[in-house]
Image: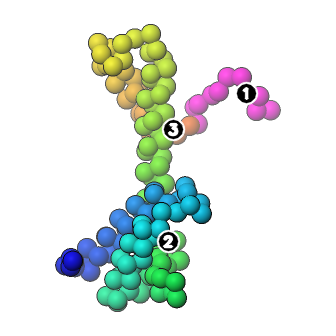
Amino acid sequence: MEISLTKTQLRLLCDLVYVGNWVINAPRGDARITPYDEVESKVFFAAAKEGMTELADVTSYGTIPSQPYVDGGIHEVIMDYEDSMFFSILSEELARRDLRDKDVDGADREELDDLIREYYTEFSANGIDNVEIKGIDTK
């Protein structure tokens, strides 16, 4: 199989593959799913072969993303995604908790959606700065 990409597209593919592999393998520790690592290695090898040597380190055990690439901002993209997902899930869980006596999957769905938006707006503006947990002594 052959795929034709411009250098810009190959660079973007490196980002996509790295982020995808990070999402799949980062939480696994030593139990990594190696076929994803192998695909990542092939994509970064292709980038190095195309002259984008700053992206990849070719080693005896395969091609890996270079340290400058890893340190260059890709993890900020991952962190933005993680924050968004965290606040989205937290917003829905809190809204469902607040409306636990309502038919949130039926007649009261609009009320649930409105409350989710309120929570999400708050978290977007302030993060968790205004969150308080009762029953935990922090002193």
Q: Nearer the viewer, mark 2 or mark 3?
A: 2
Q: Does the magenta stretch include residue 134?
A: yes
Q: Residue 70 carries which label?
A: 2
Indicate the secondary structure of the residue bearing disc 3.
helix
User: What is the C-alpha distance between the residues marked 2 and 3?
Assistant: 28 Å
Q: Is residue 119 above or below residue 82?
A: above
Secondary structure of residue under mark 1: loop
Residue nearest the observer in this picture, 107 or 76:
107
Q: How far apart are marks 3 and 1 (CA)?
A: 21 Å
Give the residue at x 40% y 61%: 20
Can you identify the residue that label 1 sits on?
A: 136
| Location of residue 68 in the rendering, given as x and y in whole percent from the top left corner | 50, 78
At x 51%, y 38%, the residue is 126
Looking at the image, do the residues carrying marks 2 and 3 touch, with CB atoms under 8 Å apart?
Answer: no
- Which of the two discs, 2 and 1, labels the residue nearer the N terminus? 2
The reply to whether residue 122 is in sight is no
Q: What residue type is labelled 3?
A: Asn
Q: Residues within 10 Å of mark 2 (few under 14, many from 20)?
A: some
Please report the bounds of the magenta region as a residue range: 129-139
The alpha-carbon separation of the residues under discs 2 and 1 comes to: 38 Å
User: Which residue does the numbered mark 3 point to in the structure image?
Assistant: 126
When asked about the image quadrant of residue 4, the answer is bottom left
| Amino acid type of the residue tagged 1 in the rendering | Ile
Count neighbours of disc 1 (C-alpha within 10 A) and say few if under 14, some if 14 to 19, many if 20 or more: few
Instruction: Check whether the beta carbons of the residues at disc 3 and disc 1 lie within 8 A of each other.
Output: no
Say whether residue 12 is left or right of residue 37.
left
